[in-house]
Image (cartoon, helix red, strand yellow):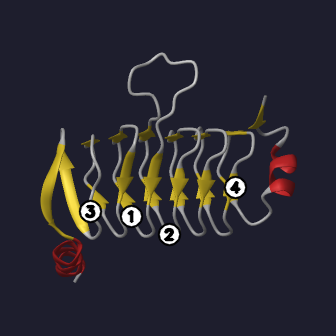
Amino acid sequence: MHTYASAGDMIGLKKKYPNVIFYGDVSIKENVAIGDGTRIGEYAVIGANAEIGCNCRILYHVTVCKNAVIGNNVFIGPNTSLLNDKYPPTHDPKGIVTICDNAVIGAGCLVLPNVTIGESAVIVAGSVVTKDVPHHMVVGGNPVKPIMTRYEYDQKKARLLE
């Protein structure tokens, strides 16, 4: 049993989540909590019992596994998958993905089960996250390795945007 939002039933989804913006067709499974101000891109799939905080941006073609916990102000780039099954196919996967507040996940990333991405962490596009990522750390690669701190990342970004 799930809710599927398409052009024909977007009204029902907007009634259930009045302060969430959906861009096109999305699939929202049962018992999902989504915070105000969150935006979800076309063809995203949000698994059952997932919790998504306020002011998140989940871009198109993102898969959020069931029981995932996503904090506030999180950005998830397109074609990213948060997975809950380490040895598929499992009929009742137990893995949980937790993403803390203000984290940034680039496009095309895979986040494996039982991983926590720390507060204000950044995952570089195309990365595979196999273990926990510390708070305020920028990581990338397959598997991810530390690249710099979030402070250094923000400084570089500011210089590039000047």
- Find residue 33 and name its label: 4
- Find residue 103 and name its label: 1
What secondary structure is found at the residue carrying circle 4?
Answer: strand
Give the residue drawn at x 78%, y 40%.
Answer: 7
Mark 1 or mark 3, whichever is nearer to me = 3
> Relative to 149, is 33 on the left or the right?
right
Residue 143 on image: x %, y %: 18, 40
Residue 144 on image: x %, y %: 19, 46
> Mark 4 or 2 closer to N-term?
4
- Find residue 134 and name its label: 3
> Mark 2 or 1 closer to N-term?
2
> Relative to 32, is 122 on the left or the right?
left
Report the Cα–Cα distance between label 4 and label 2: 15 Å
How packed mark 4 is, by other alpha carbons closer than 10 Å (few <14, some 14-19, many 20 or more), is: some
> Mark 1 or 3 closer to N-term?
1
Residue pointed to by mark 2 = 73
Report the Cα–Cα distance between label 1 and label 4: 19 Å
What secondary structure is found at the residue carrying circle 1?
Answer: loop
What secondary structure is found at the residue carrying circle 3?
Answer: loop
Mark 4 or mark 3, whichever is nearer to me = 3
Give the residue drawn at x 22%, y 83%.
Answer: 162
Give the residue drawn at x 78%, y 58%.
Answer: 17
> Relative to 9, is 120 on the left or the right?
left
Report the Cα–Cα distance between label 1 and label 3: 11 Å
> Mark 4 or 3 closer to N-term?
4
